[in-house]
Amino acid sequence: MSTNQENLKVLAENLVAYGRRQGASEIEVTVVETSRFNVNVREQNVERLTEAGTKDLGMRVFVDGKLATAGSQDLAETTLHRIVDNAIARARLGGTDPFAGLPELEPIQVSADELKVYDQAILKLSPENKIAAAMKVESIGLADTRIKKSIGSTFISVVGSWHLANSKGFSGSFRRTTVICGVGFQAGEGDNLLQDGWFEGSTSAAGLPAPEAIARKAVERVTRLIGARKVESQNVPVVFEPSVTSDLLLGFLAQCVAGASIDRRQSFLLDKLGQKIGSDLVTIYDDGLLPGGRGTAAFDAEGVPTRKTLVLDQGVLKSYLLNTYYGRKLKMASTGNAGGVNNFYMAKGASKPADIIKSVDKGLLLTGTIGFGRVPTTGDISTGAFGLWIEKGEVAFPVAEITISGNLSDVLKGVEMVGDDLELNDTIAGPTVKVAQMSIGGKGAAKS
Amino acid sequence: MGKIERREFLKLAGTGAGAFIATGLFHDRLLAGALPAAGAGLFDEKFGVSKEVMAKLLEAALSKGGDFSDLFFEYKVIMTVVMEDDIIRQSSENVVRGVGIRVLKDKQTGFGYTSSLTPESMTQAALTAAAIAASGARVRPPDFKESRPDKQVYLLEKPFVDAPLDDRITLVKEAYAAALAHDKRVVKVIANLADEMQYVTIVNSEGLMISDARPQVRLGVTATAQEGKVRNTGNGSAGGRVGITYFQRPGTTPKDVGLRAAQEAVTLLSAIDPVAGDQPVVLGSRQSGVMIHEAVGHPFEGEGIWQKTSIVWDRLGQMVASPCVTIYEDATLPYLRGSMNIDDEGTSTRKVMMIENGKLVGFLHDLLSARVLGVEPNGHGRRESYRVVPICRMNNTMLARGEATPEDVIKTVKKGFYALTYQGGQVEDTGKFTFSVNMGYLIEDGQLTQPIKNATLIGTNVQVLKDIELIGNDMDYFLGTCGKDGQSAPVSAGTPTFKIRQMTVGGRA
């Protein structure tokens, strides 16, 4: 650990000691140091170049089961002491919550090297190299005559270090690097413009796909939508592309299995632990220890060691995702998810994506959604959608300006095929999935 | 990994309880009540950044040959109080402080920022931003002309920044109690108050030096109701750029906010999914500003115009909407969530006409889009914080009133859909948008009948503007948070009740 890193660790530890002296029953201090580089390119010009380093501090203070939190970007000792004093005074005005408090001390078993989320090669990337990658990912796309316009490309590198100390004696640090490269394009004619794109991210420089691969994927995603039209309202089987599985199925499910949603009765999965809520094909994990994972960390946002949690086992709901507070409320142990999901993914299945499409006589290959329309309390889904229409096992034509609706409970139970195309390249990831039936809203007057 | 996000969205629902990190019993007394003096006074007195230092930073920023540079100094304290499980479960205080330094060279932007206000750190940030240019020209530091905002659109009577925590707790408790007491089927309530005071000083290489002190508050309640196995969640909120007295006004008392959330949750218990398909749609006034914000506002923002990615970039002077439609932006309307005296580049805000009687007459500009297009900036450069560059944003987007009563608008529909509250909306540069309706009603023979949940409205802005058929004489505003390019900004939009000839409603097929 560098001197600077050691200083931040000591800063956190000293502030914990100060808080205890001032009357906090318990106190936790987190310091995050981030350095970020970001280049935006559009039409082959560097449009924006940003570079900066920041330090942010956050704390939780408990006084007899009463919680106050605070944060500051000003790390001067006088400011930090004042903020601790304020927090202690504020906590006293709150209500006693029998479940509030720090986690019990648990040793971190894993070494930073095993996690493989800090890559020196990312630190060594020169600004010129990063700019060149952003230029290239765009130029390849612009060379395709079907592309009408670029909506810009980007290359981002982030180096972050976390230091957490608390009054139970925990003091830990870890570092993570990230690189992201992506591009978006418009295609189409007149009022019927389409846009889409692609980006990739990795914790290692070598793990980031080449600009050529990213550009090809972005071009393919937008050009396949050219000439998109509406279809009639109807109920059909729907195939989710991996990015849709991540967003519409897993992203929404992550909200519904969060301890806060369960405790607040704002989840359709309340009281469903141990029950069969999905098809046999659905197995889902959260793994904070996944080597090289975008969400991998030695400990979570309150210093609890992360772990691999089986959330859905062949359709059976095995675990919620919990921090210490909601764990205590629900009479369960923390799952190391104080910061939300770590690496939340659906296990891959046995089917080739091409075979999944072939199995559909008439249906939708859903390639993207627009809008919100996800209600954890009920599991209801209703959102704007676009994709490719499938007829007799073949992609027939692109569709846009339709809606898709259903319920996550029915989606999970209706999973009929799971692809073998899982790529663990984001904090939430899933393979291609076929769902038995969802409702499409489109052309034609509403039938009553 | 994923699709690229070049979409703008707007969130309305939810209290945000738990989403905030921070807050305080006593606001930083250092600044309480102190409106910054004209110019650099605040940052000079409190953080030791003198005018001389600011001038030197601009000099460093332009040392590589940039055309223009500005410094955005920000000091902000955000406080929250959360009530849940019948107790004040959490309070927080968050201090944001730093400077963002930007350099423009033609259409290019160089940017650096730092939370450390020492001359060394700030100079480093200035030199980082400077690197976008590479000619190395010498520039003279500007002579600052200190000025003050030419208006005051915030309600600064009894600002929260001066209030003790007890006052905040009282408001939250009242809202919580009202929601819980409304109906025995209400099983869960979360009430959240978030207030902030943001002090900014903006200086630039053309000699501008101006400051502003901006309050912002939002009281939000989420209520969940249950009957048998059916459970639903409703939301209520009130606030704006106001102080404590705002919550004593009829319609925006804590009790009103709690009741709205509870009533929505209870009504949703009997709601059903809509039948999918094209149908006439009436948008109620309460939150339908989301439609104007998404369908009109975003495509009219300057970047999409000069970059020619917006569907309307070449339609100035053309009829783009039905003749009954007049839409404008007005940050100068007092006390709304999007109201501002000056924008985040120091430009005085003003009313900007966008569509007048169906004709496209204007776009929204920040300094960059105005420079590129050779027009006047009109006060729409906004930034989430000193850590990001200003981009072209809306403030308060308005659909002008018509003459029909809301009841008469609904009466014209034999069978259709009425949208009351939303979870949010999203739009692409291509003009394709989606709105997620939290609660609506079926319209049958000109009357609101069955409550509807889980509905989505979709369309394209070029079509929906032509399909606006009838506009009511009422007006209401929402409290929204708009997301764009990864930055969030508080906004409002106001609409009367209005009717769209036909829209696609998503639901059961």
Image (cartoon, coloured by chain):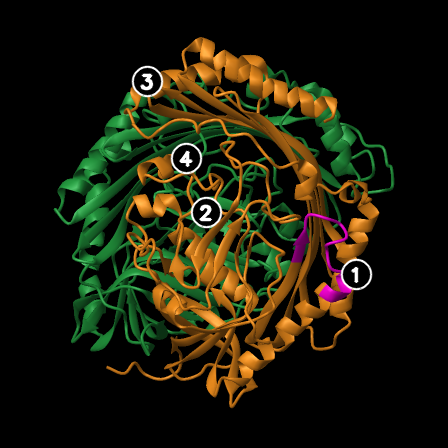
Chain name for mark 4? A
Upstream in the sequence, badge 4 or badge 1?
1
> What residue is disc 2 on?
B395
Q: Type of residue at label 2?
A: Asn
Q: Are marks 3 and 4 in contact (CB under 8 Å)?
A: no
| Chain B colour in the picture | green
- Marks 3/4: CA–CA distance: 21 Å
Q: Contact, CB < 8 Å: mark 4 with mark 2? A: no
Residue type at numbered disc 1: Lys
Camera-side residue: B229 or B143? B229
Amino acid type of the residue tagged 3 in the rendering? Arg
Q: Which residue is mark 3?
A: A92
- At x 65%, y 48%, the residue is A291
Q: Which residue is mark 4?
A: A324
Tag 1 residue = A136
Circle 3: element type = helix
Tags 4 and 2 both on a single chain: no
Confirm whether the magenta stretch covers residue A209. yes
Give the class, few, some or many, for how many residues have Cα within 10 Å of label 3's Cα (few <14, many ≥20): some
User: Horizontal and vertical percent for residue B37?
Assistant: 52, 20
Q: Check if mark 3 and mark 4 are on a common chain.
A: yes
- Magenta span of residues: A200-213
Q: Does residue B265 lie above or below B204 as drawn?
A: below
Real-space Cα distance between discs 1 and 2? 36 Å
Q: Is residue A385 magenta?
A: no
